[in-house]
Image (cartoon, grey):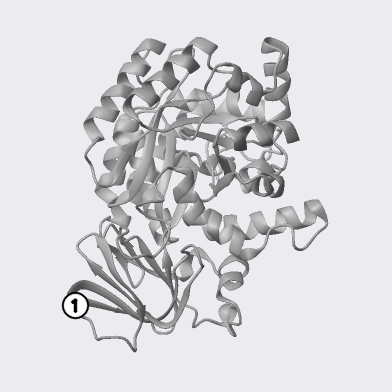
Amino acid sequence: MGDMDIIIKNGTVLTMDGEDSVHNDGVVGVKGDTIAHVGSNDQSPLRAETIIDANGGLILPGLVNAHTHAAMTLFRGLADDIPLMEWLENYIFPVESRMDGHFVRTGTLLACAEMILSGTTTFCDMYLFEEHAAMAAHEAGMRCLVGEVLYDFPSPNYGKMENGLKYSESLIKRWRDDPLVSVAVEPHSLFTCSPDLLCVADALARDYGVPLVIHVAETAAEVSLVKEKYGNTPVRHLESLGLLGPHLIADHCVHIEPSDIKTLSNHGVKVVHNPESNMKLASGIAPVPQMLAEGLTVGLGTDGCASNNNLDLFAEMDMAAKLHKVHAMDPTAIDALTVLRMATVWGARALGMDRLIGSLEVGKKADIIVVDIDKPHLTPIYNPFSHLVYAAKGNDVTHVIINGRLVMEERKLLTLDLEEITAAAKDKAEQVKRWVLPSKAGTESG
């Protein structure tokens, strides 16, 4: 077999390939940034400088957080249990208007630490000052798809709308050849972006062959507004503008009609489901079983920490499976294997990365995690797929490899100084308190 750079052995390998192949007493070999071997220990012996003993645990692809706002880790618990518009207008918007690149870098580094520690190796980000988010992800050694949020109104980062398109184009050009950082064009939503902005953003994405990411039909109020203004559902509005296609990643899709689902499927649009955020903000329940039945690719996202309040995809998987069971009053509505696919190979497909990541197959990039199952809450184990969804937690992950690089070993971060990041985040939180809680600082800050 030849020498490898890293070998992960003595675990159950869940490949998440097309056949959901499982290798008991398995081994994965990594050479450079690529998976070079997947199989069982009884095959030809492998040699490597770095050997990771999974100690009977589970070896699987790194998880894909297909929609988040990473820097909003700094707003975690800032203003919970209040109506959406009050939350936005009295807390989030005032803080965002005063942010800068350093704020976003700090929040994104904190997010990267949290995601790596809970087994996420790839994330899709939509926020402000995204050059700093990209640099933070690069520093952490995380794979990402990032994009600057675009609005009709001025941004605290780039100012006028037309500057946002130039900023997005500069991001695409700067990071085009980076092995970890990819860039998308990301207009915020149909109610914050005019048809002209949506069309110009779509043209930019198509010109450079990058994804177009947009919030779609997240709330009933959004659907009503779009219908009133344009006479169409959000999906039909996008179709009328010519924006639907395999390059489009539609986040949320909570309030969509059966005919909309067929339309999205016919155009090859990708959808990202964010169940915990949709529950916490009382946005509703996306018709994910119906989407899957129509053949749509559906990934899984946490959304931002201000509306979740964590970036743990293990918790998100558990919630996704159970939410649809109780909503349909059907325990088979979405099973554990389906949800795990949403967090791995389907999430990769949603981001246009499934040729690179999402499953453990020879030739794909080495994004791999190890889960320790030698714990009371994971004993005994009959079905590893259901265990990962219904019993495992983010802190059961012991090792994380991204692009062939070991970034966490025995729960120790190797690319980030957690103490330094945490201290910087606390400093930023003091700023936030001064900005939005001048008369009651400390009483609602979480």
Name the foreground residue: 66 vs 35. 35
Q: Residue at x 45, y 61 (%)?
A: 118
Name the foreground residue: 303 vs 435. 303
Where is residue 117? Give x, y as percent: 40, 61
Residue 342 sits in which quadrant? Answer: bottom right
* Furthest-right residue in this view: 329
Where is residue 267? Give x, y as percent: 56, 32
Q: What amino acid does circle 1 point to? A: Ala
Q: Could you say whether the residue bearing mark 1 is in a helix, strand or loop?
A: strand
Name the foreground residue: 424 vs 352. 352
Q: Which residue is mark 1?
A: 48
Quarter holding the N terminus is: bottom left
Where is residue 123? Give x, y as percent: 42, 46
Where is residue 154? Give x, y as percent: 43, 13
**Can residue 311 be spotted in the picture?**
no
Left or right? Give the position of 269 relative to 144.
right
